[in-house]
Image (cartoon, grey):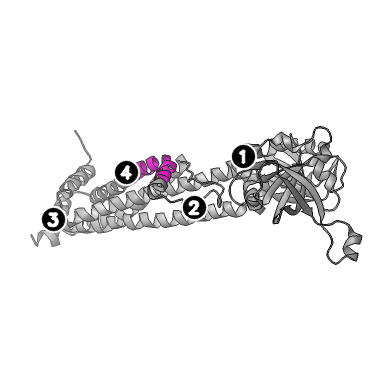
Amino acid sequence: MFKPLSLFLAFRYIRARQVGGFASFISASSTIGIALGVMVLIIVLSAMNGFERALADRLLSIIPHGEVIAVNEPIVNWRDKAKKIITHPDVIASAPVIKLNGMIQHKAELKSLEIRGVDQTLEQQVSAITDYLIAGQWDTLYSSTDPSQSQGIIIGSGIAKKLGVSLGDKIQLLLPASDINQGLSVKFPTPKKHNLMVAGIFKFGGIVDDNLAYISLAKAQDIKQLSPEQVDGIRVKVSKVFNAPSITRDVAYSFDHYVYIHDWTRTQGHLYNDIQLVRMVMFIVMVLVIAVASFNIVSTLIMVVNEKRGDIAILKTMGAAPSTVMIAFVIQGMMNGFIGSLSGGILGVIIALNLTEIFAAIETFFGVTFLSGDVYFIDYLPTQLVQSDVIATIVVALIMSTLATIYPAWRATKVEPAAVLGQI
């Protein structure tokens, strides 16, 4: 079968190099280095993709994607405004909210927290908080007879643990006094007290469990002395969470009220930024590892060129073009990059697809917990393999390994037949 001379020479030299020697060791080390670099980079990128997906699917399932909060006067006729917001093509749902900051007390224990007054039905359209209830029912937050007198409150598991309360326990909600005259006449204004009952406990993970509680919208309106048509703000759920800032701005600009514009990147954006920073740093580090391994090919080919100086001289004497000699050594060096990239890519894909299970097995074997649900919003290592990441990693490795072959192959074309053959 006909073979181009360059390809024939390349494979002949590769087979001869496999016999042994120091050049074979350097060649194998470069191949292994490229494979490890490609494998680790694919695994790291998959883990970062997994964290991004977990951030979008889990944390942002109860953290509002966007909010428009009234600056001075409360929002009036919130139902009409919520319906208008939904007409935006990128808004999935909207719901009213009233925000309160205070403390809850049970016996001698106190805990500061943020209380959200929410609508029973609409809140479930913008938040998945009901999926994380571990005690009680969402519906018990409301009173069917007189909504404004609803005594139920749903708290996070961290708050319940701090106060030592469980389902059905009575607690007191302490809010700052809003009476201006009292604030002027009394040095330490007496906080307003509201008696509530624990109607539910949720467990989400992270600091959310320690800082967040829910009461009914009607109860929050009663506390702040608002009418049923008045709220502090409206929350929105968007179709593309990473475009939430621009979508929320569009909603606010079309809003006929003076409002603050909030989105999840202002409260939880540091998590996303951290993920992107780690992703970029790890990509640079692993590319440098691949580069170091690739440039081992330079050493290998230079040694091969020195060994084959006689062969090169004879080939050039017989009329072989310099391009033929150069391509032969380029192909020989590219084989290291091809084998390393392919094997590293296959191993990286296999490990990335099973990274969560492997991580869990390591935790079980050593009896340690690397990601605690009490600190982070997840207690496992997520993974998501993206085809473009695999392709980009392999292509980068192939390009770098190919570039590493150019100089040694060019050196091979500079062998002078007369000088070499005269020494034989």
Amino acid type at circle 2 is Arg
Residue at (70, 47) in percent of width and height: 213
Q: Which residue is mark 4?
A: 343
Kind of element beneath mark 1:
helix
Chain-order first, disc 1 or disc 4? 1
At label 4, counting other C-alpha atoms closer than 10 Å, the crowd grade (few under 14, some 14-19, many 20 or more) is some
User: Residue 170: image x %, image y %?
Assistant: 73, 45
Q: Which residue is mark 3?
A: 310
Q: Quadrant of the N terminus?
A: top left
Kind of element beneath mark 2:
helix
Q: Is residue 237 visible?
A: yes
Chain-order first, disc 3 or disc 1? 1
Chain-order first, disc 1 or disc 2? 1
Chain-order first, disc 3 or disc 2? 2
Q: Compare residues 300 and 417 and report the one nearer the observer.
A: 300
Q: Quadrant of residue 188?
A: bottom right
Q: Nearest to the eye among marks 1 and 2: give it.
A: 1
At label 1, counting other C-alpha atoms closer than 10 Å, the crowd grade (few under 14, some 14-19, many 20 or more) is some
Q: Which residue is mark 1?
A: 132
- Magenta region includes residue 343: yes
Q: Nearest to the eye among marks 1 and 4: give it.
A: 1
Alpha carbon separation for disc pair 3 and 2: 49 Å
Amino acid type at circle 1 is Tyr
Q: Which residue is mark 2?
A: 279
Residue at (64, 42) in percent of width and height: 202
Residue at (62, 45) in percent of width and height: 242
User: Residue 168: image x %, image y %?
Assistant: 70, 41
Amino acid type at circle 3 is Gly
